[in-house]
Image (tube, grey):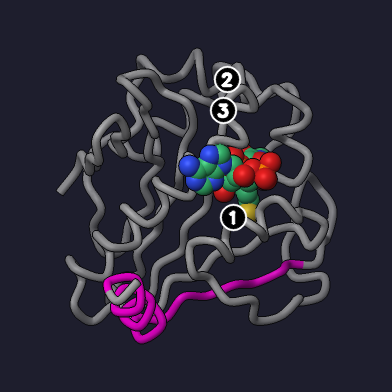
Amino acid sequence: MLPLCDKDLTVRSLCEADLDRLVNYRNDPEVNLFQNWDLPYTMALAHELLAQQANNDDLKPGTGLQLAIDIDNEMVGDMFCHISEDAITANIGFSLDRNYWGRGIIKRAAPILIDYLFEQFQFLTVIRASRDPGNIRGMDTLESVGFVFDEVAPSSVVSRGHLMDDARHSLTRYQWFDRQHRSRLD
Ligand SMILES: CC(C)(COP(=O)(O)OP(=O)(O)OC[C@H]1O[C@@H](n2cnc3c(N)ncnc32)[C@H](O)[C@@H]1OP(=O)(O)O)[C@@H](O)C(=O)NCCC(=O)NCCS
């Protein structure tokens, strides 16, 4: 159940008060470079995003939720999580305000979400994430939290009006469990 907390870091449901920050960093061309929203990213689009989860403030099968990441109670980025209706698969994504890159924040936030998903949904077998093949920083982050590169699916997503290749990664329950086991031995 949200929020998920670890010391100074909190993962919680996005709320109205976050929208100024969200709009601000989503308009940063560096943050937008490999992401699928059009620029300018307007406040109206941010309200639309929030409206899509109007009656939902927790991670539930069959729904997608935009999550805020706080460091010391300040919103610094977001993650998205969609859980399939049967709760067998989930998808995640993330973006961080550029002022907070290079501090290992997603490296901490993503595992909190991943642990929660595998612990909470006992039939969840795999979490997937995808990225633009050119997004090397995104790839590094995914691999650092345990995702394994699967394939580049050619011309398989529409992003900003263009048909794009999609680099796909996954983390199975077995891989997650094995990783946890090995980290306990270290
Ligand atoms: C992808 C993105 C989240 C990566 O940001 P990030 O800060 O590099 O992410 P991480 O949490 O993995 O942090 C790793 C960085 O923190 C540094 N770091 C600092 N302190 C650290 C610590 N205590 N532990 C781990 N890493 C630490 C690492 O050295 C690394 O920096 P480097 O790449 O300059 O060497 C960010 O670039 C972003 O928001 N991009 C735009 C949106 C996007 O592309 N999303 C991803 C789609 S797949």
Q: Residue at left 46%, top 75%?
A: 171
Q: Residue at left 40%, top 41%?
A: 66
Q: CA distance from mark 1 to mark 2?
A: 23 Å
Residue 78 placement, left or right of 102? left
Q: Please rate how many residues cluster around mark 2, counting C-alpha atoms within 10 Å: few if below 14, some from 14 to 19, many from 20.
A: some
Magenta-colored segment: predominant secondary structure: helix
Which one is in front in this view, the residue at disc 3 or the one at disc 2? 3
Going by the numbered disc 3, the residue's amino acid type is: Tyr
Q: Residue at left 64%, top 72%?
A: 168
**x, y percentage for residue 91?**
46, 63
Q: Secondary structure at mark 3?
A: helix
**x, y percentage for residue 101?**
61, 33
| 20 vs 10: above or below | above
Q: Is mark 1 within 8 Å of ligand 1?
A: yes
**x, y percentage for residue 137?**
70, 50
Q: Quadrant of ligand 1?
A: top right
Residue on which disc 3 sits: 100
Q: Residue at left 41%, top 23%?
A: 75
